[in-house]
Image (cartoon, rainbow, N blue to C red):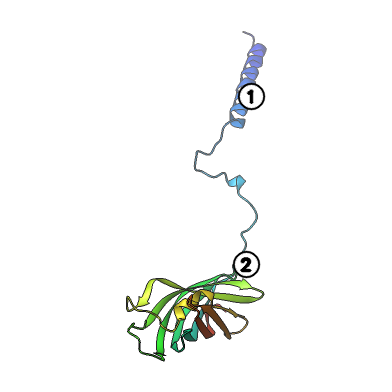
Amino acid sequence: MRRGLKIVVWVGVFAVCAGAGAFVAAHTNPFPPGVEDPGARSTTPPSTSPSPASERWSLAMMSATRHELHVGGACRSAFRTTGAITVRPDGVASGEARAVLRGWGCDFPVAQVQTRSIRLAVSGKPLDGRLDLRFYELVGGSSPKGTQDLGGFIETLPLLNLQVRLTGERERAGASVLRPDGDLGRYVNDSRIQLACATGC
């Protein structure tokens, strides 16, 4: 075979090989499954601005309650509630508290045993620039077991809401509610609350 013809043949072979290699490379993923393509990474740096932190507030509430009977006379109780709540950046709050009896009495003899302490759940949501706080008795939270709150603190808890502005390190608010007892009498609750910033305020 002539030398010039050999050169032409080999050039053709190289061209075919180069074309086949280019085709395979264009249709093959060089990175096995689970390996990230470094060229596919975003060039945008992650945000370095800190996310808003939650706030923690301690609370103390004094409640003077009474059960006024339609036949006359009343039972009274005074509870002091202490606890803490966490307020998230979106303004929603949650926490727990414990109400402890400070005093009680009735205008007539009673056979029932007065409740001494109550475990409570606390929740709150933003409302017109304030924190609207609500209190709920936890299941089985009354102590001693089998006792009654004669003054009406537990009976008025579902209606009690205290709206507090969280603009300083210490805030106060108050609320008064009443509720019919279903027997022509009524329950009355006068409560005053104070919140103090613990962290993040």
The amino acid beneath tag 1 is Gly
Few, some or many residues within 10 Å of mark 1 (<14, 14–19, 20+): few
- 37, above or below 106, in the image: above
Secondary structure found at label 2? loop
Q: Position of residue 52 (x, y in %)?
A: 59, 70
- 127, above or below 34, in the image: below
Q: Position of residue 180 (x, y in %)?
A: 52, 77
- 57, above or below 90, in the image: below
Q: Going 55% across and 36% down the picture, which residue do you hit?
A: 30
N-term-proximal mark, 1 vs 2: 1
Disc 2 marks which residue?
49
Residue toward you, 34 or 3:
34
Disc 1 marks which residue?
19
The quarter of the picture where the N terminus appears is: top right
Q: Is residue 93 left or right of residue 44?
A: left
Q: Going 62% across and 25% down the picture, which residue do you hit?
A: 18
